[in-house]
Image (cartoon, rainbow, N blue to C red):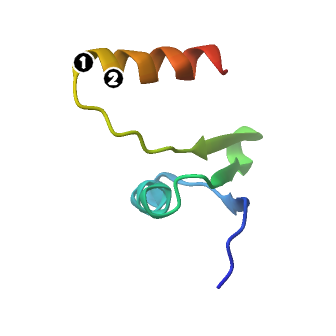
Amino acid sequence: MLSPHAVLFEYTDAERPIIAALLRECPGIRLIGLEAERNSLIVFSGSEHAVTNVEELIQVIVDKQVSK
């Protein structure tokens, strides 16, 4: 079975459910959607975090903002 670090594809709004499903199944993958009509690309990535309270949720959000 393949386990790529990234997948490049032509992006349209129809792919949104597929993107969400892939990010749930493979949280470390980067999905790179090319939008030919706009001459742009969108990079989707995901990660999973277990949180049990609001403080942990805030910490995950803050950590993500710092790592940008």
Residue 66 sits in which quadrant?
A: top right
Disc 1, SS: helix
* Residue farthest toward the bottom in the current orientation of the protein: 1
Residue 40, image x, y percentages: 74, 39
Mark 2, residue position: 57
Q: Are marks 2 and 1 in contact (CB under 8 Å)?
A: yes
Nearer to the camera, 5 or 41: 5
Nearer to the camera, 6 or 49: 49
Under mark 2, the amino acid is Leu
32 is higher (above) or lower (below) than 4: above
Q: Residues within 10 Å of mark 2 (few under 14, many from 20)?
A: some
Q: Residue at x 58, y 44 (%)?
A: 45
Tell me how far mark 2 sits from mark 1, CA to CA: 5 Å
Q: Quadrant of the N terminus?
A: bottom right
64 is higher (above) or lower (below) than 30: above
Mark 1, residue position: 54
Q: Quadrant of the C terminus?
A: top right
